[in-house]
Image (tube, rainbow, N blue to C red):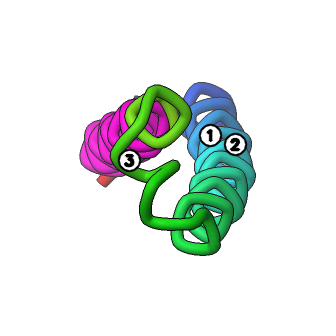
Amino acid sequence: MNKTRRKAIEALASQIEELKEQLTTIQEEETEYYDNMPESFQGGEKGELSQAAIDSLESAAGSLEEVIEYLTSAVE
């Protein structure tokens, strides 16, 4: 792989890392929101929706981490 493509891939990996960090921050905020809900709300619709969002955000962050690993492997 030439230097230009390597740098382009490294730049993409960096951008994706920034997105993953932003996503993780949002997930942490949603977790804090859920944790501060009264227990009666946690078991209700609001709590279920919040927990589903937390799970989805965690999965998305994990997937972005996987993409970063693939890109890193490509330039090694």
Label of residue 16 in the image: 1
Q: Image height check: is 49 above or below 55?
A: above
Residue 71 in picture, x, y percent from top left = 38, 38
Residue named by callout 3: 58
Q: Are marks 1 and 2 in contact (CB under 8 Å)?
A: yes
Label of residue 67 in the image: none
Residue 28 visible within the image: yes
User: Which residue type carries mark 3?
Assistant: Glu
User: Which residue type carries mark 1?
Assistant: Ile
In this rendering, position of residue 2 left or right of residue 11: left
> CA–CA distance between discs 1 and 3?
15 Å
Q: Do the residues labelled 2 and 3 touch (CB within 8 Å)?
A: no
**Viewer-nearest of labels 1 and 3?**
3
On-image quarter of the N terminus: top left
Sequence-first tag of 1 and 3: 1
User: Which residue type carries mark 2?
Assistant: Leu
Residue at the image point whose x is 58% and y is 53% from the top: 27
Residue 34 in picture, x, y percent from top left = 55, 59
Residue at the image point whose x is 56% and y is 66% from the top: 38
Magenta-tinted stretch: 51-74
Residue 67 visible within the image: no
Q: Image height check: is 25 above or below 66?
A: below
Residue named by callout 2: 19
> CA–CA distance between discs 2 and 3?
13 Å
**Viewer-nearest of labels 2 and 3?**
3
Residue 32 in picture, x, y percent from top left = 63, 71
In this rendering, position of residue 60 left or right of residue 62: right
**Viewer-nearest of labels 1 and 2?**
2
Name the residue furthest front.
40
Sequence-first tag of 2 and 3: 2
Mark 1 packing: few (<14 Cα in 10 Å), some, or many (20+)?
Answer: some
